[in-house]
Structure formats: structure tokens, C-alpha cells
Image (tube, rainbow, N blue to C red):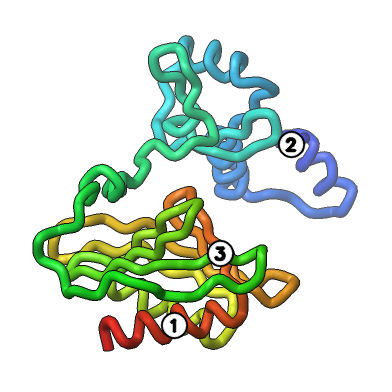
Amino acid sequence: MKITLNEVKAMNEIAGTQMTKEQEIKFIKDRLQELEFGTQAAFDTYKKQHKMKPDTKVTIAGKKTTVGQASTVKGKSIFGQKQDKEKYTDFSKKYAKLPSRTMGLSGNAAEADGKDFGKIDSEVTYHYYKMKSDKNDLFMSRKQSKQVAKALRSGVDTNIDSDTNDNDDKFPPIKVKRNKDNSMRISTGGKEMNVSKKQSKEIARDIKDSFF
């Protein structure tokens, strides 16, 4: 709950202090820039009746945002959502067939390791490095693959930024995380793959042999 100007003045009077005119003006401006609404509907109603700048700060249901972010578009609230979502290449569609310009390095990246970690193949082209399992295909740029190899060798949790190659393919960010059993989880583009500690070394070696 925000404190009003009168409440601040009352507290200052008790403390034997007083706000200057400039401080009062700043206090009022700050309050005008930080409006509170209990619900999205309350905000929508207020916005219809008042002109509000997109960068004006508002709090809706206890969550801080801006007028632009909280506004309703075509009857649907975009409150709390990112308006500009990055679009990445649909690799399974674009590269349904192996590109004609390959490096001739398609094959086995890591043998199966027990019943929990199946065989992993790789597909290497000038455009990407792909890890293939019986469940998922993970695409990554050459630059990203080198960072993945480093993370797999070290066993350290690593966040890898998105990347764009010279073919204008947009690769989403990659997360490499060590599991409790020391296996590694590689996640990108809404897909993930778990590899054993032994497989991690084999995949890192495969990437190194492919690009270094």
C-alpha cells in the first residue's frame, strides 16, 4: 500500500521535519508514474478513461510492468508477456534433407552407455552440427557446438547465447546442465538430450574432430 502525501507530511511533522516544495512536486510526479490496479480489468477500465504513456509504470495485481506491456490487444491482455519473440529457424523443415554442401562427417558421435543412454549420431555440415538420438535432434551452430564441447568436457553448467550463421540460420540459446548422476543435459529450442559422462567426452571429441 502506497503512502499518501498527507501521511508523509504527518510523519514529518511528528519527526519535526518538513518537505520542501520541490520534494512535494517530485513525490506527486513519482506517484503519478506508479499507478496501482488490483486486476487487469481495473487497469483496462482506467486506461479507456485516461490517456497514458506506454512507458508509464503500473502495478497490476502486485506485479510491476508498464502501460505498453499491460495494454490489451484485440481483447487479449499482453500483461507479463514479451511482445517481440525471437524467431528461430525451423531446422527440421529447412534441412529435412541433408544439404548438398556437407563436410562428409555424418556418423556416430557416441555409443550407447547402458539402458538409460542410447546411441547418439552426429551430422556435420558447413551450416550446423546436429546431435541425433532416437528421441530428439538438436541443432547448433559451429560456434555454439564448440562451447557445448567445452561444457561437456568440464562438466560445468553453461548458458550459450543464440547465434546466426553465414546462411542466415538463427539458432536458439543452449543450456548445458550437469545432472545429479553426473550425466549432462543439453537443451535448446524446446528439446533436450541427456548424455552420460562417458558419452559427453565422446561427443566433445567428435565436435573437436569436426571443426577444430
Q: Residue tagged by mark 2? A: 2
Q: Residue furthest left?
A: 100
SS for callout 2: loop
Identify the residue at horizontal 32%, vertical 58% (top origin).
Answer: 171
Instruction: For mark 1, give the secondary structure.
Output: helix
Specify the quadrant that holds the C terminus: bottom left
**Spatial distance from mark 1 to mark 2, Cα to Cα?**
55 Å
How far across and how far down the image is residue 102, in percent?
15, 68
Q: List the residue tagged with mark 1.
A: 204
State the residue at coordinates (41%, 55%): 137
100 or 72, which is in the foreground? 100
Total labels: the figure holds 3
Q: Please identify, in this view, whether the residue under mark 3 or under mark 1 is nearer the observer.
A: 3
Given the image, on which type of amino acid does mark 1 rest? Ala
Q: Nearer the viewer, residue 175 or 117?
A: 117
Residue 170: image quadrant is bottom left
Q: Label 3 sits on what residue type?
A: Gly
Please give the residue where the numbered disc 3 appears in the rendered image. 118
The part of the image, by quadrant, that contains residue 180 is bottom right
Residue 24 versus residue 188 in the image, above or below? above
Can you give x and y, in whole percent of width and height, for residue 143 in the image? 30, 75
Residue at (40% x, 32% y) in the render: 54
3 and 2 marks in contact (CB < 8 Å): no
In this rendering, the answer to whether 51 lies above or below 119 is above
Which amino acid type corresponds to the residue marked 2 in the rendered image? Lys
Establish if 190 lies above or below 42.
below
